[in-house]
Every structure is written in C-alpha cells, then in structure tokens.
Amino acid sequence: MQICGIDDAGRGSMLGPLVIAGISIDKKKIRKLSILGVKDSKKLSPKKREELYKKIISLVDSYYVSKISPKSIDTSVAKHGLNQLEAKHMAKVVTKLDADTSFVDSCDVNPTRFGKEISRLSNNKKIRSYHHADSRFIVVSAASILAKVTRDRAITRLRKDHDLGSGYPSDTKTIKFVKQYYKNQKTIPNFVRKSWKPTKKIIGRTYS
C-alpha cells in the first residue's frame, strides 16, 4: 500500500514561490523515515534539512514538487482564492503520485472541507486532511522537508543578486529591501507578492 504525504512551504512569505511537495512510500517502509531522523522541517536546522532531503529522495518510491509563482498567488488572492490555489496544486501532487491514501497539512480552518476539495480535484482520491499534519504524520514531515529545502534554495538564488533577508514580513531586512527597490525602480520585482499587505502599503495603492 502506497502512502503519500504533502505539505507546503513559504505560504506566509512576501516573496519567492509557494512550494508544495509530496512523497509516496510503501507503508512497510515508513518506519525507515523515523530511523533517518525525519521530523517536521521547522524543528530541523537548514543543514540537517539538506542532509535529510537527499536521504528522503533515495528512500521514497516517488516524489513531486510544485512551485507556485508570486504572480499566480497574486491572481488568487485578488479572488480570495489562496486556499483553492493550494488545494489545486496539492491535488496535482496527489494525481502525480497516485498513492492509496494521501495525508495533507490543511491550510484551511476547516481541514475536512480542504480534504474534500483536494479529493474532488484529484478524481476522488482518498485524502486525510489535518492541521499540524507535518508534526503528526512522518510522511507529511518528509514532504515538509522537501518543500522547505526547495523553497530555501529558491531564496538563496535570489539572494545572489539581492539583499532581501528571509522574505517574511516580520523580517525588517525584507521590508527594507522592497521599500528601497520600489523607491529606486518605481516598480516591484516579479518575485515579490504584490497582493501582500506590507507590499501594498509600500506601493501606497490597492493592488488589482
């Protein structure tokens, strides 16, 4: 029996992609993820996540990563459809991995509703949707590591040309970067989410 775990990374960030990652593994091999030391990516150092990323890919039967661009995010936010966008991409991962059961980390306040939407979008696949699934189910923890490493690598590439901090609104370096860029260029870089409140505040107008 194939079990799938799916998680996201970068949902709250002002810039860079929102990453959805999934892994599929035979139920009999799940214990091996524990032996590797797999746990929720937030509880691991960047170095440890990189190490586990390679080991997870070697162990699992299949994996798939979907990156959502800031432009797609902005379009969805304008329609109040960010959860729907995530559900769509999670369903894409579910369809690609084609496991018997998929465990997903719900971004919706109503995890049951979120799971039903992913099931609908993936031809009625069996979905188990929970809050904090990344700390409750090791298959989702493994997916969270893949998502986080992919996201971190994308930010590292951007940092080669820009001093932009972590990308999160709580980071003063990130806010300073967007402010300075807008002041100098009179535009916002395409890797920044224009629909985010801090960005709209910097632009000083409503994004549409």
Image (tube, rainbow, N blue to C red):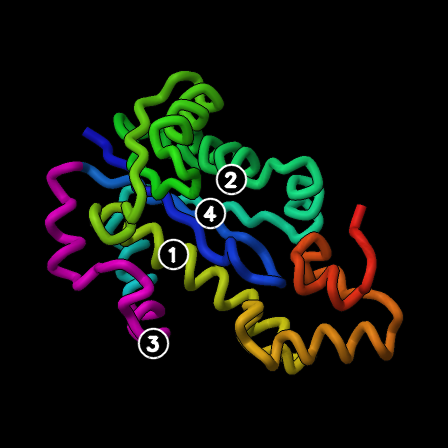
User: x and y percent of residue 188 in the render?
Assistant: 79, 65
Q: Is residue 128 magenta?
A: no
Give yes or no for contact between labels 2 and 4 (Cβ–Cβ under 8 Å). Answer: yes
Q: Nearer the viewer, residue 77 or 85?
A: 77
Label 3: which residue? 47
Measure the C-alpha gap from mark 3 to mark 4.
Answer: 20 Å
> Of the residues shown, which amino acid type is indicated by label 2?
Glu
Image coordinates for residue 131, horizontal then vertical, percent = 31, 43
Q: Main secondary structure of the magenta part?
A: helix
**Picture quarter containing residue 72?**
top right
Give the alpha-carbon distance from disc 2 to disc 4, as whole Å. 8 Å
What residue is shown at x 21% (from left), y 59% (from top)? 38
Residue appearing at x 72%, y 56% in the figure: 194
Q: Which residue is mark 1?
A: 146
Residue 35 drawn in magenta = yes
Instruction: Please give the residue where the numbered disc 4 appears in the rendered image.
Output: 20
Q: How many marks?
A: 4
User: How crowded is the residue under tag 1: few (<14 C-alpha within 10 Å), some, or many (20+)?
Assistant: many
- The part of the chain drawn in magenta is 27-51
> Label 2, on which residue?
86
Kind of residue sitting beneath label 3: Lys
